[in-house]
Image: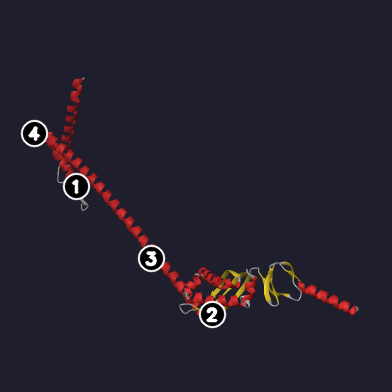
Amino acid sequence: MEIVVLALLAFVAFVLFRSVRFVPQGYRYTIERFGKYINTREPGFALLVPLIDSVGRKLNVMEQVLDVPSQEVITRDNAVVKVDGVVFFQVLDAAKAAYQVSVLERAILNLVMTNIRTVLGSMDLDESLSKRDEINARLLNVVDDATHPWGIKVNRIEIKDISPPRDLIEAMARQMKAEREKRATILEAEGAKQGEILRADGEKQATILEAEGKKEASFREAEARERLAEAEAKATLMVSQAIAKGDLQAINYFVADKYINALKAIACSPNQKLLMLPVEATGMLGSLAGVAELAKEALAKRSDPDSKGV
């Protein structure tokens, strides 16, 4: 009797153990009845029909990360590169993720690796190295659409590394160095060109200013010569009028002025080393005395009207 009671108690404990389930947070359990899916249990306490219901799949509905293994990809210009990446996905429908695809993670990895080869194969090497965001966006659109029937959401696909062969990297480094040297040469030539332009412009402005200065000086010199000529003309007129009146002192002034100017020109000559005067000093002094007398008379005539007024 005791054995029967113990057996009965053991059976009841077994039934209770099989009928009570606790679903942890972040997970979903699919419930099957006689092997057929009937519902999905949320986190918390779940009571099953003993010996009839059972837990089918235990699915993680938190965002998960899958590492995409490195693979060799041939670009459109026949360059071989190694590419790897990561995938971020989340299960939205536990039933579809459990029963629409077998081995969900492997299916996602194979789908991503295939599309990486497709996308990079349609791009040149330079594009694949410089357009990382475009590659990620194209992969995300294709993979997310393809995995939608599986009840999951692919949030991000990131390419971690694109590694060209070593010889190709060295060739790219030489090309970049040549481009930098080319740009430096162009900038240096542009600087020299600009400097020559500025220098020529400065010389042009200096020439213009110098020409304007010479022009102004010529005007001033011509004006001075004109005034000198007018003064000489007036002096000659006055002397002529004095001669016409029979004034011998005016004649002496005229002759002495011309004589002194001639001596000055001879003395200022750069080839003149010795000056000999075949003239009498008394004649020169007499002419100068005539000049002095002429000046005195001119002053006396100017002062007479003033004295008469007084």
Mark 1 and mark 4 lie on one chain; the one further toward the N terminus is 4
Q: Amino acid at mark 4?
A: Ala
Real-space Cα distance between discs 1 and 4? 29 Å
Q: Nearer the viewer, mark 2 or mark 1?
A: 2
Query: At numbered mark 4, what does the secondary structure look like: helix, strand or loop?
Result: helix
When asked about the image quadrant of residue 256, the answer is top left
Residue at image mark 1 = 265
Q: CA distance from mark 4 to mark 3?
A: 80 Å
Q: Identify the residue under disc 3.
A: 189
Residue 201 vertical position relative to residue 101 in the rendered view, above or below: above
Which mark sits nearer the N-terminus, 2 or 4?
2
User: Is 224 or 37 nearer to us in this picture?
Assistant: 37
- Residue plotted at (49% across, 73% down): 128
Residue 267: image location, x then y, percent = 21, 48
Say which element carries label 1.
helix
**Where is residue 113 drawn, in percent x and y?**
56, 77
Q: Position of residue 163 (x, y in %)?
A: 54, 76
Q: Amino acid at mark 1?
A: Ala
Query: Which residue in the structure is indicated by mark 4?
Result: 244
Residue at which label 2 appears:
72
Q: Is residue 63 left or right of residue 238?
A: right
Q: Give SS at disc 3.
A: helix
Residue 88 coordinates in the image, percent (x, y): 60, 70
Residue type at tag 3: Ala
- Label 1 to label 3: alpha-carbon separation: 59 Å
**Mark 1 or 3 closer to N-term?**
3
